[in-house]
Amino acid sequence: MSALPLSAVYDRLPIMTCNFSIQRNDETDEIGSGDFWQAELSKPRWAADVTLARGRHQELKEAAARIRMLDGARQSFLMCDPTSLYPYADPRGTIFGASTVSIREIGPDRVTARMQGFPAGYVLTIGDKLQVTYSNGQQHAYVEVDASAVASAAGNLDVAIFPRLSVLIAANDPVTIIRPACPVVVMPNSHNPGTARRAITEGAAFKVTQKVRV
């Protein structure tokens, strides 16, 4: 089931706070000498706690209905990190303009994205987010820039990213630079529709986690 576009859910929610972060599922061990091991049991994934702004009852009722229609964690939707809608060096996306970016290749370590199609001299800054769409548009990788980089005169830009990219990503897969989004589902039993208080509803909140396969 394809993830719903930004316009279906994310753009219609009165989001007040959102803290995108990484969830890890690692096994660790330590011995008396102080040696410490970490084994990654599954790929790190993004998660967020979301709170909605207080508002009139109808506005929050509509927001609650949009979340309920997702049928728990059955239907995924695309969601942005509100702090990473645009690259830091291009806060309105005007430099990027109508450019179209795609993958040239992925480094053998899967943590280097080699891309093409940028305006010459375009800057990606550590902490910026990227969305790579692959598998005929059915899958989305949501990654963070790990080191600042500048596009060449030919529009090529190579950048370190986290988490690692899927082995299914191939040359010419599109990369979203402006309003990159992560496919997420609402965590079971995390949705609070808010409390009605006189003319307003307040306290609405929910939690999401990345859905790797949509």
Image (tube, grey):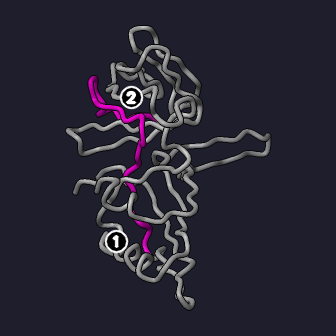
Residues 149 and 52: in front is 52
Give the residue number, with chain letter if any, for mark 1: 66
| CA separation in Å, label 2 and label 1 | 32 Å
Check contact, mark 2 vs mark 1: CB within 8 A. Answer: no
Query: Is residue 183 highlighted in magenta?
Result: yes
Give the residue number, with chain letter if any, for mark 2: 97
Kind of residue sitting beneath label 1: Arg
- Residue 167 figure quarter: top left
Q: Viewed as shown, does residue 28 lie left or right of 47?
A: right
Kind of residue sitting beneath label 2: Gly
In which quadrant of the rendered image does the N terminus lie? bottom left
Q: Main secondary structure of the magenta part?
A: loop
**Residue 97, position in %: x, y?**
38, 28
Q: Give the magenta range.
A: 162-188
Establish if 43 lies above or below 97. Answer: below
Q: Is residue 163 visible?
A: no
**Residue 150, position in %: x, y?**
52, 17
| SS label for mark 1 | helix
Label 1 packing within 10 angstroms: few (<14), some (14-19), many (20+): some
Residue lying at 42% horizontally and 43% vertically, measured from the top left: 179
